[in-house]
Amino acid sequence: MYIRDTIAAVSTPPGNGGIGIIRVSGDQAAVVGNTVFTSVSDGGFVSHRFSFGTIRDAATGEKVDEAMAVLMRSPRSYTREDVLELHCHGGWLVVERVLALVLACGVRLADPGEFTRRAFLNGRIDLVQAEAVMDIIASKSEAALQLAQRQREGALSKRIDEVRGCLLKALALVEAYIDFPDDDIGSTDVASITASVESAQSMLSDLLVTFEEGRIIRDGISVLIVGKPNAGKSSLLNRLLNENRAIVTHIPGTTRDIIEETITFEGLAIRFLDTAGIRHTDDLVEQEGINRALEKVPLADLILAVFDGSRRFSQEDQMLMDALAGRKIIAVVNKSDLPQRFSLSDETRFLAVVPITALSGDGVDLLKLTICRQFHHSSATDSREFISLSRARHRDALVSAEGFLHQFSVGLVDRNLELLALDLRGALDSVGAVTGQTATDEVLDLIFSSFCIGK
Ligand code: GDP
């Protein structure tokens, strides 16, 4: 539901900064501007033009700050409503006081993502583009940022609209025959319906295959570092991060909780999770750490199984291998500076075997490269034309559309027109949920509640 009241929020991050921006959107934006802000030049606001002046408490006349203010008249604004921005000094107290003055004019504090929600409800952007705005803010790597920018520019939305176009064409033909039940569908029309549905199906499957890669680009790769105590996991993490993040000692069992850090490499974000060494132990705290490590195993995109190259394959290594069954694993054989006693009985269980010396860093760059290669295969992803799914919400909606179209193709033999139309409408609804044509208030609440306040 869209109540057209006026909303306001601080749009810059919390804390102290150079400037702080208070954004106001709605019919009362200009009134708020004229109440709290006085320009040094005469005359009121000119749309889209900054003016310099003072912010005052209208009740007491007290000067609160010097500021720049801009009013963007509807519809040429982020929300397509009148939008006022007050750019004041960026101390948290100043910003809070200016916000309080704005709210005292009778406007409401905005909910998280409400400005962007209004941009969506007023038809300036669709839901994919609204989500892309959030992805731009949250981007952790170059590749993620590029992908989000392409989605914000509408590349994915355009492809979704093409799929909708094909489905609408097929539906129009099917419905034409529903209106004339005595006519049989002509063979040219059957061919035309089939062709439209097939091209929608092929676009859907082309999009769906991009999901894994798109998700990795957007969220990054989560890499779990596991191994027996003293194999060198913490030393490896420090080398991967190029800093002394994890405690390294010769005493086994020092890492008891999970340490999590992200780097970017080859344009991708890689999140490393260093875990407690896997072994039998009576120490309750250590055992809890081991449990936590094992819980993460099914959630990680990739596992680095770290082995001590200077020791023989042990029972503890075997314990580890059993816990990792069925996962994507790279074997990291550490301590290659020492005489090597380690050998793997079955190397085929691993995507790769990489020898390293965590102590000196030898082999660690090759390891990073090997990790990236497991995920970032197509050079197509670097091109401006690459269109990819990156959210499970989009994937699920398109999978549902595929299901309806499969049902449609099976039903085409019997040609029950009502049922065929129902399948096509089901597919259209599913596809429409991606861009927001058919999204419910609950879905919108869910999506926008994960935005930050002021966006
Ligand atoms: P973790 O328990 O698996 O996290 O292992 P640590 O990173 O704490 O390392 C255990 C011990 O092995 C420490 O004394 C490290 O200095 C040592 N170590 C780690 N990597 C290497 C390596 O590449 N070569 C040698 N010689 N020692 C290493």
Image (cartoon, rainbow, N blue to C red):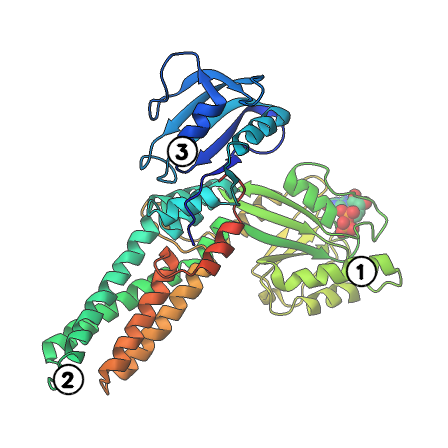
- The residue under the point 41% across, 25% down is 70
Quarter of the image with the N terminus in it: bottom left
Q: Nearer the viewer, mark 2 or mark 1?
A: 2
- Judged from the image, the secondary structure of the residue bearing numbered disc 2 is loop
- Judged from the image, the secondary structure of the residue bearing numbered disc 3 is strand
**Residue 297 position by quadrant:** bottom right
Residue 127 horizontal side relative to residue 235, left or right? left
User: Quick one: label 2 or label 1, which is nearer the N terminus?
Assistant: 2
Q: Residue furthest top?
A: 41
Along the line of sight, the residue nearer the viewer: 202 or 429: 429
Along the line of sight, the residue nearer the viewer: 73 or 283: 73
Mark 2 residue crowding within 10 angstroms, few (<14) / some (14–19) / many (20+): few
Q: Residue furthest right?
A: 282
- The residue under the point 82% across, 61% down is 287
- The residue under the point 37% across, 34% down is 82
Residue located beneath label 3 in the image:
83
Q: Is residue 396 above or below residue 78?
A: below
- The numbered mark at residue 288 is 1
Residue located beneath label 2 in the image:
181
Q: CA distance from mark 3 to mark 1?
A: 52 Å
**Residue 248 position by quadrant:** top right
Image label count:
3
Q: Amino acid at mark 3?
A: Val
**Residues at circles 2 and 3 in contact by the CB criterion of under 8 Å:** no
The reply to whether the residue tagged 1 has its Cβ within 8 angstroms of ligand 1 is no
Q: Is residue 141 visible?
A: no
Mark 3 residue crowding within 10 angstroms, few (<14) / some (14–19) / many (20+): many
Q: Nearer the viewer, mark 3 or mark 1?
A: 3
User: Quick one: label 3 or label 1, which is nearer the N terminus?
Assistant: 3
Where is residue 332 shown, x and y percent of the image?
65, 54
- The numbered mark at residue 76 is none
Q: Amino acid at mark 1?
A: Glu
